[in-house]
Image (spheres, rainbow, N blue to C red):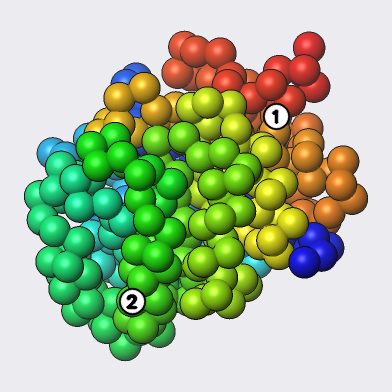
Amino acid sequence: MARPARVTLVEVGPRDGLQNEAVPVSLDIKLALVERLAAAGLPVVEAGSFVSPRRVPQMAGSAELYRRLTRRPGTAYPALVPNLQGLAAALDAGVTEAALFVSASEGFSQRNIACSIADSLARIAPVASEVIAQGVRLRGYVSCVLGCPYDGAVAPEAVADISARLLDLGCDEISLGDTIGIGTADAVRALLDVVAARIPAERIAMHFHDTYGQGVANVLVSLEAGIATFDCSVAGLGGCPFAVGATGNVATEDVLYLLNGLGIETGIDLRSVAETGAWISAQLGRDSASRAGRALLA
């Protein structure tokens, strides 16, 4: 299949990235991060999460962030919503795109949300119905699609089945997450062969963590399978509290460098993203995990 001529990058650093960073981040810094990323041309910036602040302290100020956010025309600012209570809070704060999540692994589902995959799908069904009733765009995340820290290998057929269930619930797009970053090019190719037989490629996004340094290679393999939407995190922010050793998402700067080299359009200014990556890394007292970002600013 031909590579897409244009790709959409979904910036997840302010949510998936920051929620797994140990250093507390003030609301003002989070807000500045979201607005800087949008100004750099990121078309989608996942800005917050309406989960319990006791469970994810870094996301505690999401409602206020959305209320204070200066929204750029043409930019989407989705939020993660785990339940009806979270959805109500998100809608009240002005959220117009929502995301739900489910695991492809029983072990991860039990440790992450203390229920089975079947129960988690049953739990999110009424949330999905309400999202659709409110006219809000809905995204589905599937975690551990290439392996689980508790169960080991995950069958591509199981991922395809869960993804199809999420489409049936009304999700517009399914993001397939390599939560612990163990995926390799052949594993990604095999996964997409199975999932894309059940779901149109244009409804699939890929979400790679970069634990073993394979994120950019996995993006390239996905491009060759016709995938045109990728999640990424400025400066490679993040990790996974339920997967020891997992690093953040593949860095936005590194993916952009790849796409620019392939002549694929994104509408995003790489240098602006690199400068934002250096800035947020300084706020966190750490180095940027983006090789492209560090090289560009050297």
What's under tag 1, amino acid-wise?
A: Ala
In this picture, is 197 found above or below 226? below
What's under tag 2, amino acid-wise?
A: Arg
Percent x, y of residue 19? 34, 36
In this picture, is 219 found above or below 25? below
**Residue 233 is at least partly visible in this image:** no
In this picture, is 281 found above or below 171? above
Q: Residue sitting at 58 percent across and 19 percent down?
A: 288
Q: Quadrant of the C terminus?
A: top right
Towards the viewer: 42 or 100: 100
Mark nearest the camera among 1 and 2 is 2
**Callout 2: helix, strand or loop?**
helix
Q: Residue 210 bears which disc, if any?
A: none
| Residue furthest bottom as drawn | 133
Percent x, y of residue 110? 14, 48
Asked whether, in this view, residue 142 is left or right of residue 37, the answer is left
Residue 126, image quadrant: bottom left
Q: Residue sitting at 56 percent across and 13 percent down?
A: 287
Q: Residue sitting at 43 percent across and 59 percent down?
A: 156
Percent x, y of residue 34? 53, 44
- Please give the residue where the numbered disc 1 appears in the rendered image: 274
Callout 2: few (<14), some (14-19), or many (20+) C-alpha neighbours within 10 Å? Answer: some
- Please give the residue where the numbered disc 2 appears in the rendered image: 165
Asked whether, in this view, residue 57 is left or right of residue 99, the answer is left
Percent x, y of residue 59? 29, 41
**Callout 1: helix, strand or loop?**
helix
Asked whether, in this view, residue 38 is left or right of residue 87, the answer is right
